[in-house]
Structure formats: structure tokens, C-alpha cells
Image (spheres, helix red, strand yellow):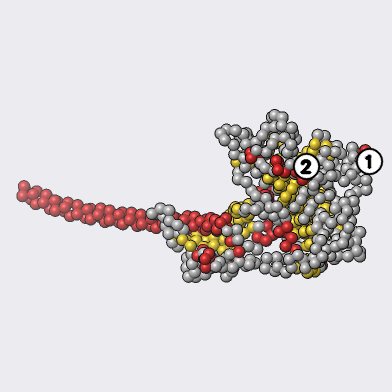
Amino acid sequence: MNGLRQRIDLTRARDDKGLAMVIALIFGMVIVAFVATSLSIATSGRVKANADQNFNAALSAAYAGIADYQARLSNDNTYFQYGNPASTYSRGSSVTMPPAAKANPAFGVGAGASWAKVPVTAPDTPTSYYRYEVNTAQYGTSGTIKVRSTGMVGNAVRSVVASIRQQGFIDFLYFTDLEIQDPQISGASTTNCVRYAYQGRPTTGCNEIAFGSGDVIAGPAHSNDTMRICEAKFTETPSTSYQPAGTALRYTAKNSLNQACAGQQFPAGVNQPSFASSIGMPSTNSQQLQETRSDLGATVPRPGCLYTGPTDIVFNAGGTMTVKSPGTKFTNTTGDGATGGSNPAQCGQPGTSSGQLGSAAGATIPVPENNIVYVQNIPSDASNKNASSTVATCSNNGVGYPLAGESTPGLGTAPCAYGSRNGDAFVKGDFHGQLTVAAQNYLYVTGDLDYVDSSADILGLTATNAVWVWNPYGALSWSRNGAMLDDDGREIDAAIISAAHTFQVQNYDRGGARGKLTVKGAIAQRFRGIVSSGSNGYVKDYQYDARLKYTAPPRFLSPVTTSYGITTVGEVKAAFRTDGSAAS
């Protein structure tokens, strides 16, 4: 019996050992499967992580391309002319490949063509490449360059498009070089006064102008000089090129009479202007004159309109303008010194017959599309096709100025207000289009100058000498304290620049209160202009046109030294595959 029990126990033991082996094998297989699965997951996770890393790095490489192009522009202001004309993105541009000395691998286009390598900044950084394409079709009109940059890392390719524009005067609602009245008008000493306050300019005798009570500057403002600020309101922090030592204020808290004042208003948390580098002013707008030549096809494919002598322009809401310019002989010229000329229909025809530029009613023509109108002085050089024997006088300029009974203001050493040979432009009306009006001498805004479509219309006004807010005064106009206009307030929608002088209200110190001067756009001037004195003139209401941050009026003036900034940037569909061929 005992022997039988022992045999049964041995059998059970052998069976248990077999079962244990089976269980061990099952668990072993499970562990192997688990390890294999874990390895597979880890491997695929690493592949995904690498793919994600490459995807993100490709976008960074694309941005690196934009930064590289921007740096090249900053180092060479002529670099905008370079690009690969074989790129479909560059259609409409006149770009060419750079010479060998300026060879750039980032201009590669097509399969097997070159890419530029992003400099490696860390040992584990993936190898990154970029290439970019350039479109300058809008550069001649708005100063804007479009760049499409593509970054590549591994099998990841991403593209971005950026708009790059010249930075300058119209980045500010208000810009001045010097915060004094124009010495040419005030009679102040140019030897003593034409210097910045922080360079030792006298505090008296130089006609420094202050921002005062009621002044509202609703936008960015900058002066290369030290501002005087009293009770004025700045909705954005202004900037100055004055950098005092220690904790001294960057502005003068005194009025124009050098009396201490308070009540200045800056944005919340700000108690003074910030510091910014100086921006150089051009001494003239004469470079805009070449935009009316018809013999410079490579640089001026679409010439604007040239008018000679005093020229009156009234803008009409339907997108036309009525132009009176009796001194004009040719509206396009050829050759240095205008030795040749022509009269394209789009600029109006010279002459005194009905519908012509010299007639009593003038010529009504469409506003030149994305272009410029330049008004020049009547040349004295007989070889110039627009030279004229018009007698020089300040009492009748041929287009209605001065008014009967008007007291013509004395302007110191400046040209007389209404010279018959002056390149003066007189403008007003309801403006519709994209245009710059440039005057070699003065530019007068003779009435409200309003946009018909504030989202699409853009106007530039430039002059070498003063830009005037016309405010005629006559000693016999007693009903309005001598003011000859019966309106109150003036609105100007435009980007304005006086290259060598000032933006100022005519007769600012007489005629009584004229209401509010509203400027919607930007103002840049060499010298600070006066708009009111005591109870006379206008109260400022300046409002920045934010569109000027990323676009400009056609063929507008640029600073002497130019830098370029990105105005918009965003990702687009990848332009290339990893082999360099164009993506479908």
C-alpha cells in the first residue's frame, strides 16, 4: 500500500514538473514578446521624435534664411537687385544673379541646385539648410520686398514668406531732426541754432517749440533732438536720440518760453521718451524727379508726371484729378537736364485750349496708378525743354495765388510764398488712388485732403522746402480776425515729409482760432513747424496710419541711411522637395 502511494506521488511530481516547465515557457514567451514590443515602441518613438525634431528644425532653418537675406540687405542697400530669375516666385521682378564676388548658395532653384547651410551652433544640432526666392515687384512703389524662404532638415521641408521694407520716417506719426523753428523762416542764427540741444544749442534765440496743452500724438513719435513736452498727450512712448548721463530725463519739461511745466501724459508706466538712434534726413527730394524720365526703362519702367512751375491739383472722389499748370511744356523728359521731352496722354496736355493744363479749368485726368507727380521750378537753363521766359514775380503765380486782398507772409530768406517760377504744388480734395505728389519748392495743402477709401487709398506729400497748411490772411477780413477762409478745422490724410525744412501752418500767429488740425498719416520734417500761437492757429490732432508700418506711398523718400525690417511673416506650403525640385 505504501509502495503504491509512493509511485502515485512520484507520478504526480513528474506531472507537476512538466506543468511548471510549460508555465515557465509561456511566461518566457510573454516576456520576450513584451520586450520586443517595448523595443518596437521605443524605436518608433525615437523615429517620431527625430521626425518631430526635423519638422521643427526645418521651420527654424526657413527663418534663418529670412534673417540671412535681411542681414545682406542691411550690409548692402543695393542687394535687393539680386535673386534667381529662374524662380517662378520672382515673376514680375527684375532680379539677377549676383556676381561671383557676391555668390549666394541660397539662390539655388531646382533639383540638384545649391542650398545654404545654417551654421551649426551645438554638437547635437541637426544639419539644416535653406534657400530663398525674392520678389521685388512692389519695391519701386512701396519699398517692399517679398522673400520666400525654405528650410530643409532630413526629410522635413517647410517654407515661410516675409515682407521686408525699408525702415524710416513713416514708421513714425511724428518725426523731426531738430526741434526748432526753421531758421530760414524765423531768421535765427544758423551758426548757433542748427545743432541738437544736447550739442550745446542756446536755450534762447533759437525758437525751440514745445508740445503743449491740447496736443494729442496718437502714434509713434521720434526726434533726433531733445523734445520740449508740456501737458501734451502721447498714446505711445516717444523716442529721442538724446541719451543723458545717469537718471536725467530725456526730454525738457519746459515750454517754448523756457518756463517749467507739468501735466505731460505718456502711456501707463512710462515717464519719459525712450532712446533710439538718429535717422538721417535727405537734403532734397530731387531724386524723385528722375521718376518722370522716359529714357530710364531699367529703373523707371513706368514714368510718373512732371509739371513745371506753380501747379494746382484738385483730387476728385471718382479717382481723377484736375490739374492747372500753365508753365508746363513736357510732362516726361529724357536726358540729364531734360534735353528731350514728350507728353503722354495720361499726364494731360500742355496748352491753353479747353481741357489742357494751361486752360482756366485745367485738365482732368485719372490719378496716376501707383506713381508720382513731380512739380519742378521753371528751369533757367535754355537747353532744358521746360525752360520758360515767365517773368519772376511774387504777386501772381498764374494759378490763383495770392488771393485778392491777401497779405502775403514774409518768409525771411526763404523763397517768396507765391513765386511765379516756383515749383509749388497746391493740393486738396477727395483722394482716391495710390500716389505721391512731390514739389521741388513748397507744397501747400489748400483744403481738406481726405481718403475716399481709407483701407486702399494712400497718398504721399513731399517737398524740399516747407509743406504748408494754407491759411491766408487779409487785413480787410475783419469778420474773422483777418482769416480769409470761412471753415474751421483741417484734415490731411497723407504721409508728409519736408526734406530740408518744415511742416507748418501759414500765418499761425494771426487770424484767430482755426479749430483742429487733424493729420491721419505721418509727418517728417527737418525743423519743427508751428501750428498755433496764443489764440491763433490750430490745435494738433495727429493720428498714425498703421498701414505705413508695412507699406509706403509710391516712390516715397527714404532716409540717408537705410535699414530693413520685417513687417509680416507667415508659413506657407513648402516650395521645394528634399531633392530641390519644386513641390507640386
Where is residue 387? Give x, y as percent.
83, 63
Tag of residue 187? 2
- Residue drawn 69% across the image and 36% down it: 202
Find numbered disc 2 in the image and state the secondary structure of the residue it sits on.
loop
Tag of residue 476? 1
Q: Amino acid at mark 2?
A: Gly
Relative side of 535 to 560, left or right: right
Relative side of 444 to 281, left or right: right
Mark 2, Cα crowd under 10 Å, few <14 / some 14-19 / many 20+, is: some
Q: Check the image and report above or below for 133 versus 229.
A: below
Find numbered disc 1 in the image and state the secondary structure of the residue it sits on.
loop
- Residue drawn 17% across the image and 55% down it: 18
Where is residue 578? Give x, y as percent.
47, 65
Q: Examine the image and state in which quarter residue 308 appears.
A: bottom right
Relative side of 147 to 57, left or right: right
Q: Nearer the viewer, residue 322 or 471?
A: 471
- Residue drawn 79% across the image and 48% down it: 414
- Residue drawn 90% across the image and 53% down it: 396
Residue 377 appears in view: yes
Q: Check the image and report above or below for 352 versus 6.
A: below
Q: Check the image and report above or below for 385 versus 144.
A: below
Where is residue 15? Give x, y as percent.
16, 53
Q: Amino acid at mark 1?
A: Leu
Query: Mark 1 or mark 2, which has the lower sequence index?
Result: 2
Q: Examine the image and state in which quarter residue 166 appears.
A: bottom right
Q: Nearer the viewer, residue 168 or 91?
A: 168
Mark 1, Cα crowd under 10 Å, few <14 / some 14-19 / many 20+, is: some
Quadrant holding the C terminus: bottom right
Where is residue 512? Give x, y as percent.
85, 37
Q: Nearer the viewer, residue 556 or 541?
A: 556
Question: Count of labels shown?
Answer: 2
Q: CA distance from mark 1 to mark 2?
A: 27 Å
